[in-house]
Amino acid sequence: MFAIVFISFLSLFYLLFVSKLSSCSSLLNTAQLLFKMTLIKCDASEMTEANAFLGPFCFTLFIFLVVFVCLSLKKLNQTEIQEERDCRMRSQYFDPIQNFPDRIDQLLEAFDRIYVDQQAELLRLKKAGV
């Protein structure tokens, strides 16, 4: 998505300002200007001098769409990926304290089976006369 938006703005800035700005004299220079704008290291007064309305309008539109929308979507995507990893980690590894009551129940059931088996064996031995 970023590439499509960036190339669209590249062609827009190149076609609008090719004859008015030296920083837009070639596609490479225009791309460098746009990357500087992405990093907010560009002088917007050049564009205002080149075209009083379209310069600030295109600059504002570029900053809004690329910096705020595209780059925040990338951050959102990274956050979603991290949350998915965390969820998988939590499902694979459990907290021993959460399973402690279940383990105690299993242990008590095992003791109960052993006790019942011993009582049954003792009763069988008493009946056999041992």
Image (spheres, grey):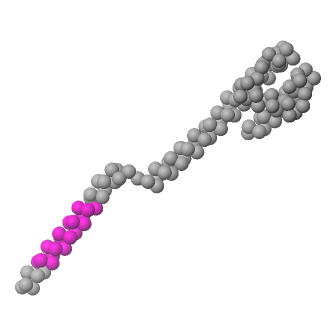
Which corner quadrant holds the N terminus?
top right
**Residues shaded magenta:** 106-123
66 shown above or below 104: above
The residue at the point 41 percent across, 53 percent down is 94
Can residue 16 be seen in the rendering of this structure? no
Q: Nearer the viewer, residue 61 or 10?
A: 10
Q: Viewer-proximal residue, 101 or 97?
A: 97
90 or 36, which lies in front?
36
The reply to whether residue 117 is visible in this rendering is: yes
In percent of the image, x 78 and y 38: which residue is there? 4
Q: Main secondary structure of the magenta part?
A: helix
Asked if 63 appears above or below 95 in the picture, the reply is above
Report x, y in % for residue 127: 8, 82
**Picture coordinates of residue 96, whole percent (x, y):** 35, 53
Q: Please report the residue visible at 26 percent of the width from the left and 58 percent of the height from the top.
A: 105
Residue furthest to the left in view is 129
Where's residue 97, x and y in %?
A: 33, 50
Corner quadrant of residue 40: top right
Q: Is residue 108 magenta?
A: yes
| Left or right: residue 120 compared with residue 129 | right
Determine which quarter of the picture holds residue 7: top right
Which residue is located at x 46 percent, y 50 percent? 90
In the image, 75 versus 42, the foreground residue is 42
Percent across and percent down for residue 91 are 46, 52
Number of numbered discs visible in the structure rendering? 0
Residue 106 lies in what quarter of the image?
bottom left
For residue 53, above or below residue 96? above
For the C terminus, the quadrant is: bottom left
In the picture provided, is 22 more to the left or to the right than 95?
right
3 in magenta: no
